Amino acid sequence: MKRLKLSLRKATPWYLLAFLLTGIMAWLPLSPVLSAFGNGWVIQDLLDPRTLGLLGNTVALATKASVLAIGLGLPLAILATRTNVLGHHFLRLCIPLPLFVPPLLLAQAWHGFSGADSALMAAICLGLSYAPLPALFAARALRRQSPSSHQAALLAGGPKSALREMVRLALPGACLGTAFAFLFIASDFAVPDYFATVGEKFSVYAGEVFNQFRDQNWRQGARAAAPLLALGLAILGLAWFVDCKFGNPQGGKVTTPQRLQLQKWHPLLQIIFSLFAWLAIGLLVLIPIGQLIWESGAAGPLAEGSWLQRSQTAFADAFTRGRGDFLRSLQTGLGAGAICFFLAPMWARFLIQVKGWKKAFLLVLLALPLLTPAMGLGIGAIVIFNQDWLRPFYAGPWLPILIFAGRFLPIAIFLTYERMRTVPSSQEEAATLAGASFLRRIFRYRMGGEIKVIWLGAAMVAVFSIRELDLAILLPAANASVAVRYFNALHFARDQFVAAFGCLMTLLLFLPYMISSSFQSSHE
Amino acid sequence: MRSFALLLALTACSQKPDVVVYCSLDQVHAEPILALFELQTGLKVEAHFDVERNKTVGLVNRLLAEASQPYADVYWNNEVAHTIRLKRAGLTAPYQSPSAADIPPSFKDPQHHWAGFAARARVLLAHEKATQLPHFIQDIGQSSATSAGAMAAPLTGTTLTHMAVWADIHTPNFVFAWLQTALDSPLSIAGGNADAMRRVCEGDVPWCLTDTDDAAAAIANGYPVEMHYLGQSQSQPGVLVIPNTICLIADGPHPEAAKSFIDFALSRQVEEHLAAGRSRQIPLRPHVPTPPTMQIPGKQFLPMAVDWEEVATQLENILPRLQQLFTS
C-alpha cells in the first residue's frame, strides 16, 4: 500500500504536466470565450423563436445524418471485422477514407454525380462523410469480443444469434462514435448552405454562430455558441454513459474469434452481404473519389488535349503549387498527433483514478475545446498569445500545433479511456511494485497490448488537424496549409486543379493509415 | 519519432518576412503579384489568405482580434466596405502612395487610409439558352419570370456591398421589402457568387447575379454562358463597380516595406497584370492595356456613382437585419 502511494506521488509530476499543457493549449485560449458565456447569456436568447427554429433545423439534420452514419457504419464494421465477406481486408482499409476528405468536397462530388439538392441531401452527404466514426468505434469493440462468447452465441442460436451478439457488443461504441459524428455535423454550415442553394431554403444554427462571430464584438459569437455547446455536451454525455454502462467490458490481450463463415449459414449469404458491403463502400468512397478523379481531367467545352493529359497537368500543378502547404500541414497534424499520443493515456489514467462529480466536471472541461466553435478557440488564442513578448511563439509553428492538439485532444482521450478502463490493472500494479516508472507502467504494462488505440487516437487528431479550416485562417503559421489553399481555390472554380488537389489531400491523409493498417494486419 | 523531430525543425526554420500581407483576393490570382513584388524588390512577403467558405471575413476578424498588437502590415481587400470598417475601428494608418496619384478620386479615401485598384463589376451571368432575363436588379425575384435564377446570400462580400449600395440609393426598407419578396419566390440563394456561377454552368438555374471575375472564369472554361449588364437605361443608376482596396495597418511591424508593397500594388503594372489574368479585373485608370473582350466602365457600360463612406454606414445598419432574414 505504501509502495502504491509512493508510485502515485511519482505520477503527480506527469499529471501536472498534462494539466499544464492542456491548460496552455486548450483552456487558456478558451478562457476569453468562456468568460463571454457568463456575460449576458440569458434563457430568452434560447427561447427566441428564430433561435429555436434554427436549432430545430440543426437537430433534425444532425439526427438524420447520424442515423444514416450509424446505420451504415455499424453493419460495415461487423462485415469488415468479423465476417468473411469478399475482400474484407481491403474493405477494412477503405472504411475510414471519407473522414480524410473535407465534407464540402464530398458534397460537391455528390452534387456533381447526382445533381440533387435539399436538406435531405445535406443530411445524406454528412451521414456518408461521418459514417466511418461509428464504424471505427464499433470495429474496435468487435475485435475485443472473447472467442468464448462468440462460440456460446453460435452454439445457442447459430449465425443469427452470433450476429445479434456482435451488434449488442458493438452498439455502445458505435453510439459514442455517432455522438462525435453528431458534434461535427451540427457545427457544419458549409454543406447545408451548399445544398440549400436550389429549391427549399433552410439554414442551420452553426451558420448563425458564424455570423455572430464576424464582428468587433466577438463575444456575441461566443454567446451565440452556447446552445450548440450545451447540445453537444448532452449528446456526448449520453453516449459516454451508454458506452460505460453497456460497452464491451472485455479488456487486455484478447484473441479475436474466427470470422463468421457466412456461406455455412446460407450459400448465397456471403455474396449478398459482400454486395451490400461493397455497395456501401461505393457510396462512401468510390463514387465521390471517382468523381474527383474524373473532374481532375474534365473541363469546359473549350478545353484542349485528352482527359489524361489534362489530369496529368492538373496533378502536376497541384503538386507544384501545394508542395509547401502539404509539408506544413503534415507538420502541424503530426505535431498535434504526437502531443495527444503522450497526453491522452495520462488523462485516461487520471480519469480512471477520479470518481463522482470530479470526474464529470473533468470530462466536461476536457470536452469543451472540441465543442466550442473553432472560430472562438482561434480568436481566444489570438487574444491570449498575441503579446509583444510572445511574438516568436505567436508567429511560429508551435502555436497551431498546440491549439490543434488542444482542440482534438478529447477524441484521443475518450478513445484511450474507453479502452484503458477495461484493461485489468493487475499488470500495472505488479509493475508498480517492481518500481517501474509512471510512463513505463502506462505505455508498457497497462496499454502495452492496446497501444494501437493510442495510435488511432493520435492519427485521428492528426487527420482532423490537417482538415481544420477555421483555425488555419486565424493562426499565423497555420494559414499556409492545404485546407486554406484547397478552399481558396474552390471559391474561384471547381476546376481540374481543385479536383487534383483534393485527391492529393486525400492521399496525404490516407497513406499513413493504410501503411499502419497493413502493418497491423500482418501481425494479427 | 526522430524523423518527425527533424521535419519539425526543418519547417520551423523558415526565413523571417519583410512584410506581412493579409489578402482577401483569391490566392491563385494574388500569388503571382506577390511573387513579382518579391522578384522586383528582393523583399520577402508572408501572405495570409481567406476563403469564401468562411464568407471571406476571417482575416477581418483576425485584424480586429489582433488590434492591440498588429501582426499584419498591409490588408489587401477584394472589396471596399470592410476596409472602411477597419478604418473606422482605428486599425488603418494614412499613407498617400505616389502610385495612387492617377487613380480616380471616387476610388480613394480623402484621408488616404485606403486606395482602390483593379475592380470587378456586378453582372448577370446567363446561360445562352435562357429566355427570360431580368433587366434591372430590382426585377430579380419579383415575378415568376425573374425568379428562376440565383444570387448569393447578401451576408458577405460583394453581394453584401451591393445591398448596402442599394440601401444607400433607395432606403433600407425598400431593400428589405424587395429581398423579402425575392426570398418568398423560387429564386435560388447560393452560399457565394462562385456557387451561383457554378449552378448556371451546370444548368441548375438559367442565370445568376455575380461578379465579372466569376463570369469570366465560366466563359474562359467554355461554358455556354454570357455576361449581361443590368440597369443600363438613363433612369437607372448603372452597374456597380467594386475595386480591390489596399490599406496600411496602423502600428504594423514593418511600415517601410509595407509602403513599398502598397506602391507596387497600386501601380499600373499590377492593374495590367490583373486585367490580363483569369479573373479579368477591370483597371480603374484609363489607358491601361486590357484584353480585347473586356468591357470598360464608361465606354461599354454605364457605371454607378457610389459614396463608399455612406455605403459602409449602410452596411453596418443593414447587416443584422440581413442575418435575421437569411439565416432562419
Image: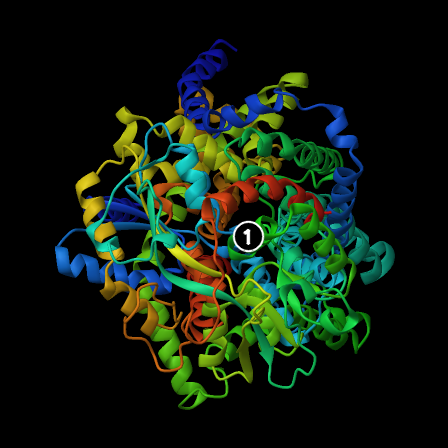
As displayed, is residue B272 above or below residue A104?
A: below
Residue B272 x %, y %: 28, 69
Residue B123 x %, y %: 54, 69
Q: Amino acid at mark 1?
A: Val
Residue extending farthest top: A2
Tell me the chain of label 1.
B
Q: Residue at x 59, y 50 (%)?
A: B155
- Residue at label 1? B165
- Left/right of residue A273 with respect to residue A518 in the rendered view: right
As displayed, is residue B101 above or below residue A26?
A: below
Badge 1 element: helix
Residue A473 x %, y %: 43, 46
Q: Nearer the viewer, residue B139 or B78?
A: B139
- Asked if residue A330 can be seen in this view, the reply is no
- Left/right of residue A518 with respect to residue B135 in the rendered view: left
User: How many neighbours does mark 1 have within 10 angstroms: few (below 14), some (14-19), or many (20 or more)?
Assistant: many
Q: Residue at x 32, y 67 (%)?
A: B274
As displayed, is residue A64 above or below residue A379?
A: below
Q: Nearer the viewer, residue A497 or A258?
A: A497
Residue A317 x %, y %: 34, 72
In which quarter of the view is residue A42 placed?
top right
- Asked if residue B147 can be seen in this view, the reply is yes
In which quarter of the view is residue A37 placed?
top right
Q: Nearer the viewer, residue B81 or A17?
A: B81
- Left/right of residue B190 with respect to residue B186 in the rendered view: left
Q: How many numbered circles are shown?
A: 1
